[in-house]
Image: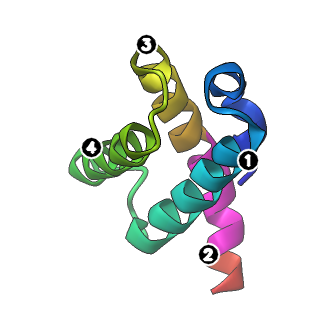
């Protein structure tokens, strides 16, 4: 997941190294918590949203940009989940 590139709003505030660390942690968190039907089950999606927001807050991601960043991460995860499933 190249969320690092999609979360550009945080680069100015956090800097590139921190944003890279956030992206790596987000990928690990999302992959670890993904289930087969995660895209169809709202409770699983809600859990993933909470986890993503927790990671963003932990690293001081700007609060006014967190919702958009969370949505972007979940959209990317949905696209990449097929690849991840094939690799498993």
Earlier sequence position, callout 2 versus callout 3: 3
Residue under numbered circle 2: 85
- What secondary structure do most residues of the magenta stretch adopt? helix
- Residue at the image position 21 percent from the left and 49 percent from the top: 43
Q: Write down the residue under mark 4.
A: 46
- Discs 4, 3 touching: Cβ within 8 Å: no
* Residue extending farthest bottom: 88
Residue stretch rendered in magenta on the structure: 76-84
Colour setting:
rainbow
Quarter the N terminus occupies: bottom right
Q: Are marks 2 and 1 in contact (CB under 8 Å)?
A: no
Asked which secondary structure carries label 1, the reply is helix
| Magenta-colored stretch includes residue 37 | no
Q: Which residue is mark 3?
A: 64
Mark pair 4, 2: CA separation: 20 Å
| Residue 65, percent from left and from top | 49, 18
Residue 80: within the magenta?
yes
Q: Looking at the image, is mark 2 or mark 1 earlier in the sequence?
A: 1
Residue mark closest to the camera, 2 vs 3: 3
Pinpoint residue 61: horizontal percent, then vertical percent: 49, 31
* Label 4 – label 3 distance at C-alpha: 19 Å
Q: Is residue 43 above or below residue 61?
A: below
- Please tell me which of labels 4 and 3 falls first in the chain: 4
């Amino acid at each position: 997941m190249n969320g690092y590139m999609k979360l550009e709003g945080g680069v100015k505030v956090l800097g590139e190294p921190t944003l890279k660390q956030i992206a790596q942690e987000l990928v690990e968190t999302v992959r670890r918590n993904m289930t087969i039907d995660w895209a169809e089950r709202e409770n699983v999606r809600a859990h993933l949203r909470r986890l993503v927001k927790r990671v963003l807050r932990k690293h001081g991601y700007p609060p006014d940009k967190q919702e958009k960043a969370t949505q972007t991460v979940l959209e990317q995860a949905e696209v990449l989940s097929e690849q991840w499933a094939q690799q498993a």
